[in-house]
Image (cartoon, helix red, strand yellow):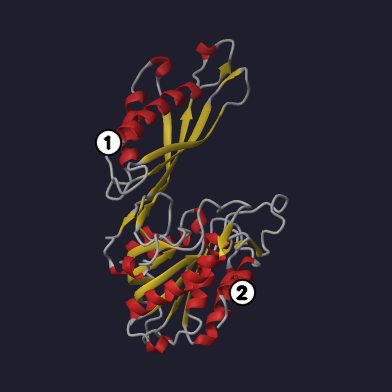
Amino acid sequence: MISARAILEQLVAIPSVSNQTNRPLIEAIQKILEPLGWHHRLFPYNDAAGIEKLNLIVSSQPPQQGSEDQTIEAELAIVCHTDTVPFNTASWPHATQLREQDGMLHGCGSCDVKGFLACILAAVSELDATHLHHPLCLVFTADEEIGCRGARFLVEQKALHTRYAIVGEPTSLTPAHAGKGYCLASIHVKGSAAHSAYPDAGRSAIFAAARLLREIELISQELIQDRNDAFSPPWTTINVGEIHGGTAKNIVPADCSFLLEWRPIPGQPTDLVLNRLRSIIERLSSEEGPNKLEAEIEVLRLEQGFDTNPTSPVVRAVQLPSSARARAHTIAFGTEAPWLARMGAEAVVIGPGSMLTAHSPRECIPLTELEECVQLLRTAIHQLCN
């Protein structure tokens, strides 16, 4: 049996940043799994930059004759993305070298989520797939870090239907049975340029954007009333993370744009904030004079959350009864679980490591959690597929 640590060392050594093809990592996964007799099916696409991306579904059961384009059916899918965020070699020269220090394994992707990926491969390394009573699928996706595009592609292709799904993300091995959605829009506010000594000759896009931002802040305060106390914070949050505008200190700005993000609680329409924003823009644009607003909205993402009953068999299968981590909780960060829910799954999110170290040179994973996760996955496969 190959150890999860040894596999992780191989995986970290293969850069798989989202702006690159993930083919080398997919081929490394296939090389490990092919001797085990699993059945592989690739779902390739080219991203907006024309770069090849691969989704891989590996099944314990052979496809039915003539079913090359048919939906793959599974009782359980274990899902893991293959991409990482970019890393700066100047500040992180050893990003692709797995290093151990004080019981922690350091390296880019070690916790998000190549550690979980290594656990999957180690967990099935001695599994005789022919002895499973119910089909198991291993799903390896592209481009999770830039909008779950690989999982979205699988949904569009109707590639998979599964009853249960275990989605890998760093949760310190505490199962997450529910998660907020993720929505993003770009707002472009238009004005009219003029010399700043004569502001009445123009119309400031930045001042107009400021009025709109104040209205958005009021929306965020209203959303506090709609609560789901399973989450922290227990309401839909709003954030404006970027804003750009103007050309020079002495020019009335003709343009201002900002990115608006909101994370809806499960059950709340993903377009609730969007519809309120549209109503506000319509009201402000009907005003005459200098306060008239001209703005356009470009919707970038509208993704709902997921909410699996905490008593679901898939949640129970990954709980550790003897651990303080046994009780399932919720998460506020985005995952591929909502896309698995669209494939029919009752989904749970779990994995070794903490998101608090991810996306930074501090990224690491406890060696003990890596080993514990392998056993956890073996137990879940046994409970749900036998």
For this rendering, which residue is in front, 190 or 102?
102
Answer whether residue 50 is visible to the viewer in this image: no
For the C terminus, the image quarter is: bottom left
- The kind of secondary structure element at disc 1 is loop
Answer whether residue 121 is visible to the viewer in this image: yes
* Residue 153 image point, x, y percent: 43, 63
Above or below for 135 versus 283: below
Above or below for 303 versus 349: above
* Circle 1 residue: 225
Q: Residue at x 36, y 66 (%)?
A: 319
* Circle 2 residue: 6
* Residue 19 image point, x, y percent: 60, 57
For this rendering, which residue is in front, 181 or 374?
374
Q: How many angstroms separate mark 1 from mark 2 (CA)? A: 49 Å
Q: Residues within 10 Å of mark 2 (few under 14, many from 20)?
A: few
Mark 2: amino acid: Ala
Mark 1: amino acid: Gln
* Image quarter of residue 10: bottom right
Upstream in sequence: badge 1 or badge 2: 2
Instruction: Report whether 267 appears left or right of 92.
Output: left
Q: Residue at x 58, y 56 (%)?
A: 49
- The kind of secondary structure element at disc 2 is helix
* Residue mark closest to the camera, 1 vs 2: 2
